[in-house]
């Protein structure tokens, strides 16, 4: 009987120690949510009333964009006819919002003229298109136009209506427009563009990749079945000329078409940085939303405010935990130390699990999640109280401590399982039926409840049983068992 108890106790202690060591060695740590580390929050609403299916499709596309940005534990939810997007820990909030909130249709427009960055109705200068050699494999190549080359330039008259940039509300697919290309928030050049020939619906996927042959970043794209035919028709029409990729009235790239046959795939090359290549690939993959959205409200949560919330939450949790442990030690004495060790064990396992999930699944700890962990301390302590009170009942019935510890646990564990099952069901329902902060609370409460069941069986039971067979534990003057256990009922033996 003693050996299985020792094996159980040593086993869970070894698992806890190894998990903490592994977490420290690989450098895992919990990611913090929007309210703890700061970030950005935006409320998007459709310009015109749309049905529920369109909004749900928009949420799916926005979630795909956010996942591609690498944001940990984003919260994207629907509230009425609005979409609420919360992005914790983003380093470039403006870029994130620009990508998430971009709602216009992705369009391919032929380039008629390359214009200066600023409006000038006098004359414009057009750079000769830059071309690259076609790749020897079946994948064909196009090229992003770099800063206009100073050689082989031609001067043309201004387009009708001057060179004023077309307002976003006048950017219609069937019209000739003048749209800007920006870099780091600044307009670097503008393009006079013909009517849109294709939309983003011809694309199947796109990804950024470092091209070792050219020593530069490129964007590889694939076309869907119908899109491959249409894109080849476009390429044959504009081979040797530039075709702009336009999203939300902004030119994302203006590659030169250098072949008439793409056979379903191609590559955009040029002077891309890694960030530019990945952003262009992201735009090509998730370029168009089915409805035009506008930012009704956006706010940036500062990291300092999140730090204050974290410190306040940790402070409140530690004070509460200290008071609980102090009470348990004063009331149950040596058994109170078992509670302290059990809580430390649960905390070590919780830290390791949350750190692992943060590193591998993007789980983020929010203030609501921290609240769920703090509340779970009460659930865990309740399990110890149920067990210890059962011991008191056994001893009052005339049993010895040695015989009571195992018998008492067998009866108490059924109560613990019933209570934890109710807590877990409640947490699971909250997680499945709610969104946002409540979901975080439910997840951490549910995880803590599962750990309570495991620790109660593999640590609390063997620990108390083994100590109950030790006279120093049962008969010590000050650290002996608590009042209800130390003073056995009349006729009982300690």
Image: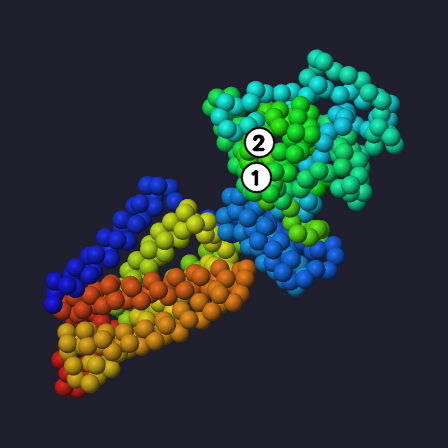
Indicate the quadrant containing the C terminus: top left, top right, bottom left or bottom right: bottom left
136 w.r.t. 371: above or below: above
Other residues around mark 2 within 10 Å, as few (<14) / some (14–19) / many (≥20): many
Other residues around mark 1 within 10 Å, as few (<14) / some (14–19) / many (≥20): many
Lateral position of residue 154 relative to residue 108, left or right: right
Lateral position of residue 95 relative to residue 212, left or right: right
Lateral position of residue 210 relative to residue 196, left or right: left
Indicate the quadrant containing the N terminus: top left, top right, bottom left or bottom right: bottom left
Instruction: Report the Cα–Cα distance between label 2 and label 1.
Output: 9 Å
Q: Which residue is mark 1?
A: 223
Q: Position of residue 51 (x, y in %)?
A: 68, 62
Q: Foreground residue, 115 or 11? A: 115
- The total number of labels drawn is 2
Q: How is the image coloured?
A: rainbow
Q: Position of residue 94 (x, y in %)?
A: 64, 41
Question: Which residue is found at the position 44% from the left and 67% from the top?
Answer: 428
Does residue 6 appear in the picture of this structure? yes
Does residue 478 appear in the picture of this structure? no
Question: Which residue is found at the position 69% from the left and 56% from the top?
Answer: 45
Question: Which residue is found at the position 62% from the left and 53% from the top?
Answer: 58
Could you say which disc has been placed on residue 262 in the image?
A: 2
325 w.r.t. 487: above or below: above
Q: Foreground residue, 367 or 76? A: 76
- SS label for mark 2: loop
Residues at badges 2 and 1 in contact (C-beta under 8 Å)? yes
Farthest-out residue, top = 151
Question: Which residue is found at the position 14% from the left and 86% from the top?
Answer: 491
194 w.r.t. 464: above or below: above
Q: Position of residue 187 (x, y in %)?
A: 72, 30
């Amino acid at each position: 009987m003693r050996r299985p108890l020792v094996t159980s106790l040593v086993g869970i202690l070894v698992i806890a120690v190894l998990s903490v060591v592994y977490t420290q060695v690989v450098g895992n740590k919990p990611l913090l949510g929007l309210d703890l580390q700061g970030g950005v929050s935006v409320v998007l609403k459709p310009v015109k009333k749309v049905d529920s299916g369109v909004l749900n499709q928009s949420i799916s596309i926005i979630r795909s964009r956010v996942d591609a940005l690498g944001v940990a534990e984003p919260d994207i939810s629907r509230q009425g006819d609005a979409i609420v997007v919360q992005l914790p820990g983003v380093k470039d909030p403006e870029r994130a919002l620009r990508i998430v909130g971009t709602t216009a249709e992705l369009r391919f427009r032929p380039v008629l003229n390359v214009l200066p960055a600023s409006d000038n109705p006098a004359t414009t200068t057009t750079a000769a298109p830059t071309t690259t050699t076609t790749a020897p494999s079946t994948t064909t190549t196009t090229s992003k136009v770099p800063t206009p080359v100073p050689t082989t330039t031609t001067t043309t008259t201004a387009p009708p209506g001057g060179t004023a940039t077309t307002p976003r509300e006048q950017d219609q697919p069937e019209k000739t427009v003048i749209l800007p290309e920006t870099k780091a928030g600044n307009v670097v050049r503008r393009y006079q563009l013909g009517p849109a020939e294709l939309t983003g619906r011809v694309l199947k996927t796109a990804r950024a990749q470092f091209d070792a042959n050219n020593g530069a970043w490129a964007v590889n794209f694939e076309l869907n079945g119908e899109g491959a035919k249409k894109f080849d028709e476009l390429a044959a029409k504009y081979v040797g000329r530039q075709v702009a990729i336009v999203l939300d009235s902004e030119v994302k790239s203006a590659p030169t078409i250098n072949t008439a046959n793409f056979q379903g795939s191609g590559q955009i090359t040029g002077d891309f940085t890694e960030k530019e290549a990945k952003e262009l690939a992201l735009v090509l993959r998730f370029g168009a939303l089915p409805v035009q959205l506008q930012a009704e409200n956006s706010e940036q949560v500062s990291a300092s405010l999140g730090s204050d919330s974290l410190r306040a939450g940790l402070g409140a949790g530690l004070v509460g935990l200290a008071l609980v442990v102090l009470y348990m030690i004063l009331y149950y004495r040596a058994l109170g130390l078992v509670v302290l060790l059990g809580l430390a064990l649960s905390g070590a396992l919780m830290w390791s699990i949350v750190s692992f999930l943060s590193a591998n699944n993007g789980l983020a700890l929010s203030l609501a999640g921290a609240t769920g962990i703090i509340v779970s301390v009460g659930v865990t302590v309740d399990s110890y109280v149920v067990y210890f009170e059962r011991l008191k009942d056994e001893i009052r019935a005339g049993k010895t401590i040695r015989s009571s510890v195992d018998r008492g646990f067998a009866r108490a564990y059924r109560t613990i399982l019933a209570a934890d099952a109710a807590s877990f069901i409640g947490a699971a329902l909250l997680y499945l039926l709610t969104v946002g902060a409540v979901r975080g609370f439910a997840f951490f409460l549910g995880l803590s409840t599962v750990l309570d069941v495991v620790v109660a069986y593999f640590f609390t039971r063997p620990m108390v049983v083994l100590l109950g067979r030790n006279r120093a534990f049962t008969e010590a003057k000050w650290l002996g068992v608590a009042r209800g256990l130390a003073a056995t009922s009349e006729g009982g033996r300690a």
